Amino acid sequence: MAKIEIYTTDFCPYCSRAKALLEKKGVTYQEFDSPHGSDARRRAIENSGGRTTVPQIFINGKSIGGSDDLVALDRAGKLDALLAG
């Protein structure tokens, strides 16, 4: 099983959408609360190559982007293979 990390903030509809898709896929993930200025947010920005929006999603340490990117991978039939590990 893949290691999934997701950096989120409260009341973020894109974060909720990404988490719902991951839950629908039946995978577990580690969520980091990442408000502006937090250490978690700085880590997400650094690890994603400078992306400042949330959510930031990492699968096995690789940045796959945000909610729209996650959904695009699923629609293209590529997400399940990544989640398998």
Image (cartoon, rainbow, N blue to C red):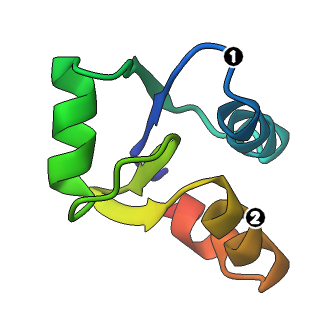
At which x and y percent is residue 57?
Answer: 46, 50
**Element at badge 2?**
helix
- Residue at image position (22%, 17%) is 38
Foreground disc of the pair 2, 1: 1
- Residue at image position (78%, 40%) is 17
Near mark 1 (Cα within 10 A), the count class, few <14, some 14-19 or many ≥20, is: few
Q: How many marks?
A: 2
- Residue at image position (24%, 47%) is 45
Q: CA distance from mark 2 to mark 1?
A: 19 Å
Amino acid at circle 2: Val
Choose top left, top right, bottom left or bottom right for residue 40: top left
Amino acid at circle 1: Phe
Asked if residue 64 is positioned above or below residue 55 in the image, the reply reads: below
**Element at badge 1?**
loop
- Near-viewer residue (11 or 85): 11
Mark 1 = which residue? 11
Asked if residue 13 is positioned above or below residue 57 in the image, the reply reads: above
Near mark 2 (Cα within 10 A), the count class, few <14, some 14-19 or many ≥20, is: some
Of labels 2 and 1, earlier in sequence is 1
**Mark 2 vs 1: CB contact within 8 A:** no
- Label number found at residue 61: none
At which x and y percent is residue 25?
Answer: 78, 47
- Near-viewer residue (45 or 73): 45
- Residue at image position (67%, 27%) is 12
Relative horizontal placement of residue 63, taking residue 28 as reference (left or right): left
Relative horizontal placement of residue 20, taking residue 49 as reference (left or right): right
At which x and y percent is residue 72?
Answer: 73, 75
Mark 2 = which residue? 71
